[in-house]
Image (cartoon, rainbow, N blue to C red):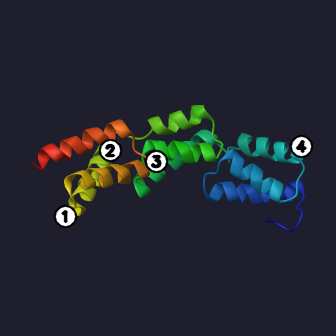
């Protein structure tokens, strides 16, 4: 971790840059402050200062995180939700972030991933092909009900 102990003023300056560079969760920032060797009261004070000055906004973080993981890594809602929970984001902000993902884009991405995986497994036996496509999409964090619907649509299209 961090060896030197910083004064609250030094820590605040460092954290302003840390938060300005990229959106951060409250948990990440709190951990960083404790790593600087600050006391609980100092940490709480700096956190509230960062929030007041709009360097730190958990809702903004959650929405940006969800959108980024969906667009860039093509993660499903379940995986995004789990990752946000790991970062100790509130349920309210997690739900808000998940709602910010465009439904049409979400279904289009799921269909594209499913079709690509399905076509890659052409040489596989039918049940293996279904199972591997299903497992791949579950691993990506998509909802089982949506996966089943998409796979059955693909099966019908490819008959």
User: Of marks 2 and 4, which one's residue comes earlier in the chain?
Assistant: 4
Q: Mark 1 sits on what residue?
A: 123
Picture residue at 81% right of the left edge, 47% below the top: 46
Q: Mark 3 sits on what residue?
A: 67
Between marks 3 and 2, how big is the CA–CA gap?
A: 11 Å
Q: Is residue 61 left or right of residue 16?
A: left
The answer to whether the residues at label 3 and label 2 have Cβ atoms under 8 Å apart is no
User: Of marks 3 and 2, which one's residue comes earlier in the chain?
Assistant: 3
Label 3: few (<14), some or many (≥20) within 10 Å?
many
Q: Element at badge 2?
A: helix
Closest to the observer: 13 or 152? 152
Q: Mark 4 sits on what residue?
A: 41
- Pinpoint residue 6: horizontal percent, then vertical percent: 88, 61
Q: Mark 2 sits on what residue?
A: 105
- Residue furthest out toward the bottom: 3
Picture residue at 47% right of the left edge, 52% below the top: 68
- Residue furthest out toward the left: 159
Q: Nearer the viewer, mark 1 or mark 2?
A: 1
């Amino acid at each position: 971790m961090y060896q030197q102990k910083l004064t609250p003023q030094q820590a605040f300056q460092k954290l302003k840059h840390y938060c300005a560079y990229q959106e951060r969760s409250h948990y990440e920032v709190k951990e960083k402050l404790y790593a600087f060797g600050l006391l609980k009261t100092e940490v709480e004070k700096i956190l509230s200062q960062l929030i007041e000055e709009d360097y730190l906004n958990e809702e903004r973080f959650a929405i940006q995180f969800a959108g980024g993981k969906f667009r860039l890594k093509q993660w499903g809602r379940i995986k995004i939700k789990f990752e946000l929970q790991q970062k100790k984001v509130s349920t309210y902000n997690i739900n808000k972030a998940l709602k910010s993902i465009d439904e049409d884009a979400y279904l289009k991405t799921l269909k594209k991933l499913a079709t690509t995986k399905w076509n890659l497994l052409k040489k596989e036996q039918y049940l293996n092909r279904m199972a591997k496509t299903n497992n791949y999409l579950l691993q990506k964090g998509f909802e089982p009900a949506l996966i089943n619907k998409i796979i059955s649509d693909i099966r019908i299209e490819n008959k």
